């Protein structure tokens, strides 16, 4: 029997595979337009290039960060012909740090880009346009971020502790001790943090650091080995100097070094204080968060005799202000720990007309006991993957008004299709500029029953 030619099975049926583009290669390009995430797009030699830090019409030199098939990801290295819209990036780390991607674009143009992204998704996916576009909800473009995770990694070869933020499209760490998007209270901590961490005896055992600013300032250190008494003293002195709480995250859940330490933030318009723990979801932009809550309640227009449903309620960010204005609020969240924390927040603010429930919000709500009495209005604030199963049955709850707060225009548009099928019309929509200097888009939409 003849020997089988196994290799023939793997031969291409026709044509030839284009050679892969190596990482680090530099290419001169003329940018055609902007993608929805703010990167420049150009079609060059049969490939689609996405270029960080480039604007439409610019001629740039781009450095390849990665290539997959016919898609190339790159970063602007030099600008030969600049757009008239380009501004000098306010941060010296712009273009290398992965935290901000739009610093070269004026803030007004950032807002316009985000507005176009939302309008395009609603039009292309759902085939709708709101009856009214709301003005963008925004605040200061810098000094807004009240929470940040700082990357920490020991480089054994260089015997160096790297402290900073992740680089664009990479796990590399950009050494940073000055970040202009952080709130002012965290700036001096960020500046002194690298030197303090390098004083610790086991740098290879350090994980990451999280910074918090609210009703208190806090520094959390993730560590993979016990800390020595000397290291704890260094950390205590550092936090004491900055009037910050020290939290440690070894085995188990994060714990405050001093018993009784607590974190929280205020919603001034409603005289509310919400407590949270590291790991809980908290909006990082305090000013836009409070404006967002106010706008959501204004659009929902709740009346004092109404029963309102808040889905994906988290710590009670919307539910507690709602409870100040209506007869009853039912608030639902998927994570039991957050439900418990939200209930404690309601009690500590002396609110007794809000009930919290745990439920799997990836499933329909029709069988839930708390849903059977129906609701006059619904507010939902789902994660990035949206709320498809929930919205498919929302009409059965009887609500004539619905406010949908979204952190992903694509899933908002997808869910809009379902709401329109159920007889809701898109009354109003607008963007929420929760993350200036980035292409991240949050949005709010008001739906009314036809």
Image (cartoon, helix red, strand yellow):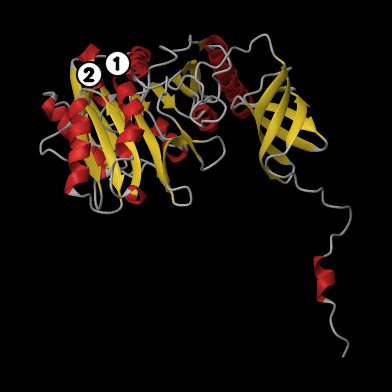
Pointer 2 local density, CA inside 10 Å: few below 14, some 14–19, many at least 20? some
Q: How far from the left and from the top, in percent, is residue 84?
A: 68, 8
Q: Tell me, yes or no, whether the two marked residues, 2 and 1, touch with CB atoms within 8 Å.
A: yes
Identify whether 172 is placed above or below 8: above
Give the image quarter of residue 244: top left
Q: Which residue is mark 1?
A: 302
Q: How far from the left and from the top, in percent, is residue 75?
A: 64, 31
Residue at screen point 40% across, 28% down: 177
Pointer 1 local density, CA inside 10 Å: few below 14, some 14–19, many at least 20? many
Q: How far from the left and from the top, in percent, is residue 229?
A: 16, 47
Q: Give the SS element for disc 2.
A: loop
**Residue 126 - label:** none
For this view, does 359 lie left or right of residue 44?
A: left
Q: Is residue 18 visible?
A: yes
**Residue 326 - label:** 2
Cα–Cα gap, marks 2 and 1: 6 Å
Q: Quadrant of the N terminus?
A: bottom right
Identify whether 327 is placed above or below 150: above
Q: How far from the left and from the top, in percent, is residue 438?
A: 51, 24
Give the image quarter of residue 143: top left
Pick out the residue farthest to the bottom.
Answer: 1
Residue at screen point 77% across, 38% down: 47
The disc, 2 or 1, on the residue closer to the chain's N-terminal end is 1
Q: Give the SS element for disc 1.
A: loop
Q: 235 or 429, which lies in front?
A: 235
């Amino acid at each position: 029997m003849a020997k089988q030619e196994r290799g023939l099975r793997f031969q291409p049926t026709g044509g030839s595979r284009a050679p892969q583009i190596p990482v680090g290669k530099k290419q001169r390009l003329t940018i055609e337009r902007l993608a929805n995430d703010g990167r420049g797009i150009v079609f060059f030699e049969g490939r689609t290039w996405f270029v960080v830090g480039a604007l439409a019409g610019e001629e740039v030199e781009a450095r390849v960060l990665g290539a997959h098939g016919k898609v190339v990801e790159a970063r602007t290295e030099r600008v030969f012909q600049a757009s008239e819209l380009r501004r000098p990036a306010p941060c010296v780390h712009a273009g290398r740090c992965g935290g901000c991607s739009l610093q070269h674009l004026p803030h007004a143009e950032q807002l316009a880009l985000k507005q176009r992204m939302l309008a395009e998704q609603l039009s292309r996916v759902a085939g709708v346009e709101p009856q009214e576009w709301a003005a963008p909800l925004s605040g200061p473009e810098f000094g807004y971020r009240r929470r940040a995770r700082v990357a920490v990694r020991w480089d054994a070869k260089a015997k160096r502790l790297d402290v900073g933020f992740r680089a664009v499209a990479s796990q590399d760490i950009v050494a940073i001790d000055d970040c202009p998007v952080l709130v002012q209270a965290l700036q001096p901590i960020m500046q002194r943090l690298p030197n303090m961490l390098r004083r610790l005896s086991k740098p290879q055992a350090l994980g990451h650091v999280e910074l918090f600013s609210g009703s208190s300032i806090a520094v959390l250190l993730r560590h993979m080995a016990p800390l020595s008494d000397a290291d704890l003293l260094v950390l205590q002195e550092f936090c004491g100097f900055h009037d910050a709480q020290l939290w440690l995250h070894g085995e188990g859940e994060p714990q405050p070094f001093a018993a009784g330490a607590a974190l929280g933030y205020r919603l001034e318009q409603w005289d509310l204080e919400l407590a949270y723990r590291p790991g809980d979801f908290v909006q990082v932009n305090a000013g836009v968060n409070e404006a967002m809550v106010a706008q959501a309640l204004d659009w929902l227009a709740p009346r004092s005799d109404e029963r309102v449903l808040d889905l994906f309620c988290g710590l009670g960010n919307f539910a507690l202000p709602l409870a100040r204005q209506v007869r009853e609020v039912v608030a639902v969240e998927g994570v039991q720990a957050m439900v418990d924390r939200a209930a404690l927040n309601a009690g500590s603010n002396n609110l007794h007309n809000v009930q919290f429930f745990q439920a799997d919000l990836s499933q329909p709500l029709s069988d839930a006991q708390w849903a059977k009495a129906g609701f006059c209005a619904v507010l939902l604030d789902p994660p990035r993957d949206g709320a498809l199963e929930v919205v498919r049955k929302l009409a059965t709850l009887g609500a004539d008004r619905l406010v949908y707060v979204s952190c992903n225009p694509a899933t908002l548009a997808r869910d809009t299709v379902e709401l329109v099928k159920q007889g809701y019309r898109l009354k109003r929509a607008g963007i929420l500029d929760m993350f200036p200097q980035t292409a991240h888009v949050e949005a709010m939409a008001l739906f009314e029953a036809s």
